[in-house]
Amino acid sequence: MRLLLFGAPGVGKGTQAKLLSSKFNIPHISTGDILRQAVKDQTELGKKAQEIMSRGDLVPDDIMIGIIKSRFSKSDCKTGFILDGFPRTVNQAVELDRLFSEMNINDVKLINISADEEEIVKRINNRRACKICGHIFTLSEIENSISCPDCNAKDSFYLRDDDKEEVIRKRMEVFRKTTEPVLKYYEKQGKVIFINGLGSVEEVNSELLKILGSRS
């Protein structure tokens, strides 16, 4: 099973990706994570990416595609993968399709998780991160807690700049302008699975598994 996770910031992609990864025993691949790993490992592409990022520039699509290809080539991706965070533009989608063709991958589906924008803003604004381990929690998860559930650091919760309302609305605007055309690109190929992300995590996951089961 090969899936692309798609949706606006805060819609629940990461949470569903982890659940699907566990259910189907396939890796959840976050492009942000593999980019950081490539830089840490000082691979050839990682070194190029580090040089570009140190200038404050975006990593070009060809380097990202190379890093993704390297990750897809690992043994744990033989039976499938969940790609989260890419593509974000139509050009990236075209380049990713070329990679799939080159690697003889032809069964990819895009899962589009959608939710009302006001609900997304509320969700993200209710998140808090631990400044020690970086893990993110909802306010309900850490209610009455003074220590991080993951690293036990005390008084470490904070509201990230990216999770502030004005920043969220700006990210949503950017998403609509640059990323939504990607959805139309895959719709024309008949590869999109639509999921309403407004329910609970369990409800959304149950509906998703039901749809994936009927199409497997």
Image: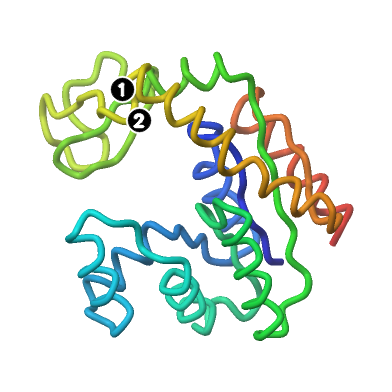
**Looking at the image, residue 34 lies above or below residue 205:** below
Residue 115 at x, y = what percent? Answer: 64, 25
Left or right position of 192 against 84: right
Q: Quarter of the image holding residue 63?
A: bottom left
The residue depicted at 70 percent of the width and 48 percent of the height is 111
The residue depicted at 27 percent of the width and 76 percent of the height is 48
Residue 146 at x, y = what percent? Answer: 17, 21
The N terminus appears in which quarter of the rendering? bottom right
Q: Nearer the viewer, residue 114 or 170?
A: 170
Q: Indicate the amino acid at tag 2.
A: Phe
Q: Nearer the viewer, residue 125 or 186?
A: 186
Residue 97 at x, y = what percent? Answer: 68, 70
Q: Earlier in the sequence, mark 2 or mark 1?
A: 2
The reply to whether the C-beta atoms of the residues labelled 2 and 1 are less than 8 Å apart is yes
Q: Which residue is mark 2?
A: 137
Residue 49 at x, y = what percent? Answer: 29, 70
Q: Which residue is mark 1?
A: 142
**Looking at the image, residue 157 lies above or below residue 97:** above
Q: Indicate the amino acid at tag 1.
A: Ile
Left or right position of 123 against 156: right
Q: Nearer the viewer, residue 63 or 19?
A: 63
Q: CA distance from mark 2 to mark 1?
A: 7 Å
Q: Nearer the viewer, residue 213 or 128?
A: 128
**Looking at the image, residue 154 lies above or below residue 59:** above
Q: Quarter of the image holding residue 191?
A: bottom right
> SS for tag 1?
loop
Left or right position of 45 against 72: left
